Image (cartoon, rainbow, N blue to C red):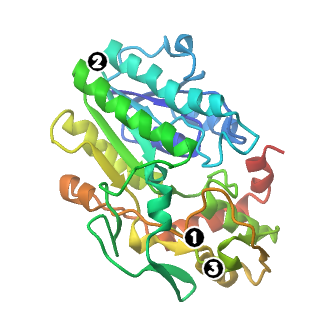
């Protein structure tokens, strides 16, 4: 089986590519190196036998080399929820990357009769609906106090509202989901949409607005400045996390299934078991690296949310899938990487 991965030098794309090569798959991929640090993964991919070229999914000509593939994994995106509004990336550029890039990859699938796996995000869920969830602080973290048909102790399910606003980033991924499903139905190729929680693990390029587990642990290890933003400076906001190698186990099942099955959209996440607040992550870091002061900034950050945990029960039922790595396993892996790579914060920032 031959698999093409867009964004192959990103954290998730490179881990998937290396994992697939270890299993004997023929893998190709491209990347435009827009993410600082991603160029460091090129050598690892080529050494593993991944066919790689510098390319940008926004441009059809850069995808002309994708031939004879059985599956396309769309792992290329500007992954920041602040993209398009923070002055670093224009709104048009965000949509060109995240939406039009997916259209170009779908055209490849149409041309090659290849399946598509779209890596989507929890950010497709409605910001007002998420902010309206009844949460209270308990033991340094927000917890959900009332259960509904779409949100419970296990997290949000796939029927949770996706009504606007979801951020420009979330809208670009939600629109990509719909187009992918439409292309698959119209042209007869299989499509799977996986809405991922926070991806985390060693080698992730962490920043405050993306890759928060890596950013927090690396910053703590270096005694670099950290701060709790908004939410009265408590650090109670909660996210769950998932290692890309656990994601790979699901993708293998989806590729083997082809067009079988009725459900096409799945939450893919560590769920409630992996959910941690920044305050709880700080407690773990203090035990691992010693004390470190965290500043407080009471100014709310755009699109920040108190509690986002995904329920992957649908994936578990359909695919007999559960993540193998615990949140502690992931944090220990990142901490080891932080000790071995003291320069990583500068790498992630492009310095």
**Mark 2 surroundings: few (<14), some (14-19) or many (≥20) residues within 10 A:** some
**Mark 3 surroundings: few (<14), some (14-19) or many (≥20) residues within 10 A:** many
The nearer-to-camera label among 2 and 3 is: 3
**Mark 1 surroundings: few (<14), some (14-19) or many (≥20) residues within 10 A:** some
Quadrant housing residue 45: top right
The nearer-to-camera label among 3 and 1 is: 3
Q: Earlier in the sequence, mark 2 or mark 3?
A: 2
Q: Is residue 7 left or right of residue 218?
A: left
Residue indicated by mark 1:
332
> Visible in this render: residue 49?
no
Q: Position of residue 179 (x, y in %)?
A: 37, 29
> Residue 145 or 317: which is nearer the viewer?
145
Please name the residue shown 66% across and 84% down the image.
Answer: 287
Tell me whether the residue at label 3 lies in contact with that at label 1, contact meaning CB atoms closer than 8 angstroms: no
Please name the residue shown 34% across and 76% down the image.
Answer: 153
Q: Which element carries disc 1, helix, strand or loop?
A: helix
Image: 329 above or below 233:
above
Q: Is residue 236 left or right of residue 351?
A: left
Q: CA distance from mark 3 to mark 1?
A: 17 Å
The nearer-to-camera label among 1 and 2 is: 2
Q: Earlier in the sequence, mark 3 or mark 1?
A: 3
Residue indicated by mark 2:
113
Tell me whether the residue at label 2 lies in contact with that at label 3, contact meaning CB atoms closer than 8 angstroms: no
């Amino acid at each position: 089986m031959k698999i093409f991965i867009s964004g192959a030098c990103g954290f998730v794309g490179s881990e998937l590519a290396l994992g697939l090569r270890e299993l004997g798959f023929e893998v190709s991929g491209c990347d435009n190196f827009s993410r600082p640090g991603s160029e460091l993964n090129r050598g690892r991919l080529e050494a593993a036998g991944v066919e790689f070229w510098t390319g940008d999914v926004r441009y059809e000509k850069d995808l002309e080399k994708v031939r004879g593939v059985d599956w396309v994994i769309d792992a290329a995106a500007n992954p920041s929820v602040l993209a398009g509004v923070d002055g670093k990336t224009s709104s048009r550029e965000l949509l060109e990357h995240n939406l039009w890039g997916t259209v170009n990859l779908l055209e490849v699938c149409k041309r090659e009769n290849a399946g598509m796996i779209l890596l989507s995000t929890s950010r497709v869920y409605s910001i007002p609906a998420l902010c309206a969830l009844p949460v209270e602080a308990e033991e340094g973290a927000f917890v959900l106090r009332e259960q509904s048909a779409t949100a419970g102790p296990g997290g949000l399910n796939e029927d949770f509202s996706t009504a606007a606003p979801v951020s420009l980033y979330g809208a670009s991924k939600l629109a990509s989901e719909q187009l992918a499903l439409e292309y698959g139905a119209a042209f007869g190729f299989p499509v799977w949409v996986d809405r991922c929680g926070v991806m985390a693990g060693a080698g992730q390029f962490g920043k405050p607005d993306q890759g928060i587990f890596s950013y927090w642990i690396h910053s703590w290890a270096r005694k670099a400045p950290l701060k709790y933003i908004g939410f009265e400076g408590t650090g109670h906001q909660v996210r769950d996390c998932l290692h890309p190698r656990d994601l790979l186990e699901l993708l293998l099942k989806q590729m083997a299934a082809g067009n079988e099955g009725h459900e096409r959209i799945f939450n893919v996440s560590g769920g409630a078991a992996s959910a941690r607040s920044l305050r709880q992550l700080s407690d773990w870091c203090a035990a691992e690296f010693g004390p470190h002061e965290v500043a407080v900034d009471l100014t709310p950050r755009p699109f920040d949310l108190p509690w986002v945990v995904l329920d992957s029960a649908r994936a578990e039922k359909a695919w007999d899938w559960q993540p193998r790595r615990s949140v502690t396993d992931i944090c220990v892996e990142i901490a080891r990487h932080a000790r071995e790579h003291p320069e990583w914060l500068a790498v992630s920032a492009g310095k």
